Image (tube, rainbow, N blue to C red):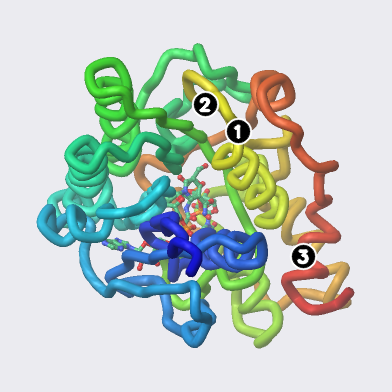
Amino acid sequence: MSEPLSPILVTGGAGFIGSHLVDALLAQGHAVRVLDNLSMGKRDNLPLDHPRLQLIEGDVADATLVLQAVAGCSAVVHLAAVASVQASVDDPVSTHQSNFVGTLNVCEAMRQHGVRRVLFASSAAIYGNNGEGQAIDEATAKAPLTPYAADKLASEHYLDFYRRQHGLEPAIFRFFNIFGPRQDPSSPYSGVISIFTTRAQQGLPISVFGDGEQTRDFFYIADLVELLLQALAAPQVVEGAVNVGWNQSVSLNQLLGEIGSLFGGLPAVSYAPPRPGDIRHSRANNQRLLECYRPPSPTSIRFGLQQLLGLS
Ligand code: NAD
Ligand code: UD1
């Protein structure tokens, strides 16, 4: 009889990014273990009857559970977090448990079990407004404006400590704005593309926070999954954080224009005051990404929106 496969642990694997990665890992023949508290993630995002998939329902803030979840794994992809920046502004104490304590628990469990490779979902939010509208490279001074960003930056530092001290192999990705199917639109804290497209589909009014001229570097989910698979398979881990964006700036008003052109019009759009801690412009210098990985050709926003809406 052949040895059972060592699973790859995907924390937050029932969520938007995680569930796409889980599908891809299963398709590659891996065994996958998901640890998710289902606060945002859903069972329906996962093929639960797959023989190589195991779901542990629980919290990354629970050190004992994380220790159990990491046992026997070959690698970890640590995605579990409260992904909303605004949620961290409203509830810093509770989001800190998920967004920072969870990372520390993962590091410690990996150290105890001798698991080395970990992919980590950091964020462009750690740069704050230091990009000043220009493409931001990884060496740009960090200016976390929110508890979310502070927790991501602290997590990066702890991963680096565990790398130096305990031989962990962290591949740190600073995602810019990822979009695609399964991004949950149901909370006011959800990603802007999921909210705007759902509301446009349902003919419901759209609120823009600020003047709509803030910009983001939107990155399609399938392109991201490709990078994560490469990072798991790479013989050598890429040292230091890598921005994940396409070095492009799309304003919310331009985004609304695209969505409107796909639907042949938009519902009422109103403009409200900006959110506290909201970043004005966010655009990746992606030189390191191009040097360290083999990214696929970029999925355009229009094609990504068509895929998301089932129009192509
Ligand atoms: P998501 O909310 O769909 O996924 C996060 C998952 O983590 C959810 O399934 C949720 O239930 C789970 N989770 C949250 N807290 C948990 C906890 N304490 N214990 C266990 N599970 C918990 O969001 P996403 O967009 O898929 O984000 C995945 C990761 O990528 C997050 O770390 C997020 O901060 C990061 N990220 C996302 C983006 C983006 O644009 N979507 C950009 C930068 C970074
Ligand atoms: C997003 C991610 C965050 C990630 C960061 C990296 C989510 C929920 N947030 O944060 O995890 O770390 O990118 O760049 O995935 N807006 C509106 N109307 C709405 C909703 C949002 O105008 O109904 C605006 C926001 O005020 C903001 C922009 O749209 O200016 C983007 O918001 P959001 O999608 O929440 O993303 P980020 O805050 O950039």
Q: Which mark is residue 113?
A: none
Amino acid carrying label 1: it is: Ala
Element on which disc 1 rests: loop
Left or right position of 139 against 112: right
Amino acid carrying label 2: it is: Val
Tell me whether circle 2 and circle 1 mark residues in contact (CB < 8 Å): yes
Total numbered circles: 3
- Note whether 99 is above or below 179 in the view shown: above
Q: Nearer the viewer, residue 171 or 259?
A: 171
Q: Which residue is mark 3?
A: 305
Q: Which mark is residue 237?
A: 2
Q: Residue at x 31, y 43 (%)?
A: 148
Query: Ligand 1 falls in which quarter?
Result: bottom left
- Note whether 309 is above or below 149 in the view shown: below
The CA span between labels 2 and 3 is 32 Å
Q: Which residue is mark 1?
A: 234
Q: Residues within 10 Å of mark 2 (few under 14, many from 20)?
A: some
Which quadrant of the rendered structure holds the C terminus? bottom right
Amino acid carrying label 3: it is: Leu
Circle nearer the viewer, 2 or 3: 2
Going from the N terminus, do you reach mark 1 or mark 3 first?
1
Tell me whether circle 2 and circle 3 mark residues in contact (CB < 8 Å): no
The CA span between labels 2 and 1 is 6 Å
Circle nearer the viewer, 1 or 3: 1
Name the spot of residue 262 as percent of width and height, x first. 86, 71
Q: Does residue 311 appear in this view?
A: yes
Q: Nearer the viewer, residue 302 or 240?
A: 240
Q: Residue at x 71, y 20 (%)?
A: 291
Going from the N terminus, do you reach mark 2 or mark 3 first?
2
- Note whether 233 is above or below 4 in the view shown: above
